[in-house]
Amino acid sequence: MEAIITATGDFPIERFAREKGIIIPAVLTIGENRESFLYYFEDIEEQDRDTAMFLKVNNARKNGNVLTLYSNSTHHMEYSLFRNLIAIPTLVVDFQYVKEGSHYFHVRFHRKYLKEFSDLISSDAFPAINSVRYLGENRKSVENAKLFFRFFKVMRVSFRFELPGGRGTDRTFPDISGDYAGEVRYISENKKIPFNIYTKPTAKVIPPNETGQKTQDEITEVSFQNDLLNQIIFLSEHVAFPNFGVYFTRRDGIYRFEALIPAIYSKEYMKKVFNVSGKSPQWGMTLDSIGEAAFES
């Protein structure tokens, strides 16, 4: 299932986006006691005066060519909805952005959990500022991606790596047998990667000693902590890299890590990955492919 949720409140970032007529990419992060949003701007010399002043007043952080604004549920309690949202099994947070004075959130989940989703959006935990713009089958996901990629030029950046010494030797990575595909459900500030694994219904991918929540025959939730991958996902402490999807695959013992990155940040992202991988040569991480993310009409 797929859903598009919007939030329209009195957030400064919403007012600014509406006044300037711009779309601002965002990333949700979940911490121990807070839910946060990071909003991204490109650091360019010709930044107009209003934008430069807005970023300065709101204490934008600079990392390379990326300027980041930060806001959390301590100041905006409405953000706390997302802790309840990501508690729905299998739910993946997709595209997030601010457009025309509203936050937009695209999410996906297995239809088995439609009741959990319905219960949430009809409860008091669903703030009045939120509304559901779409709820239905995943057949609209490609259509939504086509529309979304008209807003942003998005690059698909892929790296390959191998576990140091082979599978099962690194306890910070899931010891999963066979080939599989998966994706990050959302960005966690506590550095544990919440991960959906997709396999054939008959496959037994999670060994008895591995922690994982079996949510559906072909979907298993696993969370794990790996310093290398966390450093790649984060620009710096608690500042996630702007992305519209993070994916993993394992084929014939080779792991691939792929991210959809706004093109204006892709150079900075690749620089970050090379800097991190250079400090951990035992992973043998190499660039696999780069290309514009697009869907055939």
Image (cartoon, rainbow, N blue to C red):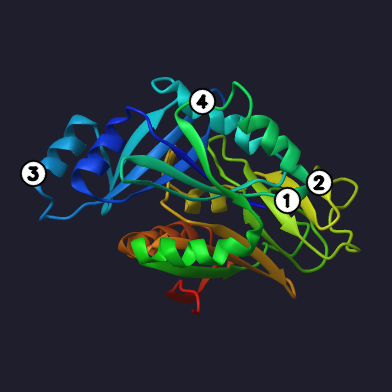
Can residue 3 be seen by looking at this rendering?
no
Whole-percent x and y of residue 278?
46, 62
Measure the C-alpha gap from mark 3 to mark 1: 45 Å
Q: Look at mark 3 in the image and give the residue it sits on.
A: 49
Q: Residues within 10 Å of mark 3 (few under 14, many from 20)?
A: few
Q: Look at mark 1 in the image and give the residue it sits on.
A: 110
Measure the C-alpha gap from mark 2 to mark 3: 50 Å
- Nearer to us: label 1 or label 2: 1
Say whether disc 1 or disc 2 marks the residue closer to the N-terminus: 1
Q: Look at mark 4 in the image and give the residue it sits on.
A: 127
Whole-percent x and y of residue 53?
13, 37
Q: Looking at numbered disc 2 in the image, what kind of residue is underneath it? A: Thr
260 sits left or right of 178 in the view = left
Q: Looking at numbered disc 3 in the image, what kind of residue is underneath it? A: Arg
- Nearer to us: label 4 or label 1: 4
- Which residue is drawn at the image coordinates 88% and 63% (left, top)? 203
Query: Looking at the image, is 295 positioned above or below residue 232?
Result: below
Query: Looking at the image, is 97 positioned above or below residue 178?
Result: above
Measure the C-alpha gap from mark 4 to mark 1: 23 Å
Measure the C-alpha gap from mark 4 to mark 3: 34 Å
Q: Look at mark 2 in the image and give the residue it sits on.
A: 215
- Which residue is drawn at the image coordinates 48% and 29% (left, top)? 79
Q: Looking at numbered disc 4 in the image, what kind of residue is underneath it? A: Pro
- Nearer to us: label 2 or label 4: 4
Whole-percent x and y of residue 295?
50, 74
Query: Looking at the image, is 273 positioned above or below residue 24?
Result: below
Say whether disc 3 or disc 1 marks the residue closer to the N-terminus: 3
Measure the C-alpha gap from mark 2 to mark 4: 27 Å
Give SS at disc 2: strand
